[in-house]
Image: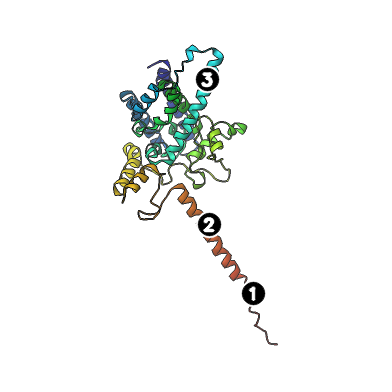
Amino acid sequence: MDFIDQLLLFVALPVVVLISLVEAVALSRRQHYDWRAAGVSVLDLLARVTIQIVLPLSIATPLLQCAYRHRLTTIRFDALEPGQAILLGALVFIGQEFCYYWFHRASHRVRWFWANHAVHHSPNQLNLSAAYRIGVLSKFSGTALFFVPLVWLGFSPKLVFQLLQLNLLYQFWIHATWIPKLGWLEHVLNTPSSHRVHHAANLQYLDGNYGGVLIVFDRLFGTYIPERDDLPCRYGLVKPLTDYNLLRIEFAQWGSLLGDVFRAKSLRSAVGYVLMPPGWRPADGSEGAGETTEDMRRAARDATAHRATVSGRTHRVRHRPQDAGAVTAD
């Protein structure tokens, strides 16, 4: 454990928890604050840190080791001139942010990764304590594989994952709901406003704003969704989880996934349940109606179109002129 690891574990984490407690006290004086949910987040943090210390490897470790053995070059910052080190540092930051974007996007669009990431979205209130409720099975799900390209290019795995921890540390403050929009910074950085949208369960807000520090890749790849003044965010999962049992929160999505896989009527369906977006069902309807974001938005559009059609028919009936043949006797 080097200096950065010690700084993150023994300084940053206690400070983060302390700041979230200060926010909790302040918010509880103005509104209802879910203290039990905050307690669950603390338990998740403690369990996750314990697992990382006791079990430092993940199922992606063999791939990371292979990538580093066959790396294109070896990049050492201590062997560079200051100007070169700054330029390379900027490049690895952008590269790490790019990898993080696709990791985070896959965590919402691939059910295997969502099974763990859903833990982070389970709080029904968004506050600073929700920032460190991340899920204890990230090593089991293999999310580290998204950062293999950086290792293959020549950056050490330790550096890559320390940068990831710093990325996540940046994201702590953007879980605050009391920080307003930040003007021109909204075009560059992942801000509290952008992240409120990311955590919202409103149909209009689903599956957007995946960036870590930056929001530029969302704008580049069409996943940026701005926060609307006329549409308050509803936080939590699409189907809210009101349980405070840590085990259910951690493993509910995994249980649901395994249940769908075992009940699948074909191997293709079983693979689909693992690799397709949450809510996916076979297109033939043999295993029920799909509930992906696209399915729900399509259903909402169809319902809106149907209401508009019915309303138009009703309007025409109510305003139909009298029969032309009807006459009034003197």
Report the amino acid beneath label 2.
Answer: Thr
Q: Secondary structure at mark 3?
A: helix
Q: Position of residue 226 (x, y in %)?
A: 56, 40
Residue 92 percent across, percent down from the top left: 50, 23
Residue that lies at the very extreme toward the left in this rendered image: 262
Question: In what element is the residue under mark 2?
Answer: helix
- Identify the mark at residue 304; answer none if there is no mark: 2
Tell me which residue sits at (62%, 33%) in the image: 183
Q: Is residue 178 visible?
A: no
Residue carrying label 1: 321
Dot 3, crowdedness within 10 Å: few (<14), some or many (≥20)?
some
Above or below, 290 against 194 in this view is below
Q: Earlier in the sequence, mark 1 or mark 3?
A: 3
Q: Tell me how far mark 1 sits from mark 3, CA to CA.
A: 76 Å
Q: Tell me which label, 1 or 2, sits earlier in the chain.
A: 2
Q: Three-letter amino acid code at disc 1? A: Pro
Where is residue 311, by image quadrant? bottom right
* Mark 2 Cα shell of 10 Å, populated few (<14), some (14-19), many (≥20): few
Q: CA distance from mark 3 to mark 2?
A: 51 Å
Q: Is residue 208 left or right of residue 264?
A: right
Give the image location of residue 329, x and y in percent.
68, 87
Q: Nearer the viewer, mark 3 or mark 2?
A: 3
Residue 141 image offset from top left, x and y in percent = 35, 34
For the N terminus, the quadrant is top left
Q: CA distance from mark 1 to mark 2?
A: 28 Å
The residue that label 3 is drawn on is 88
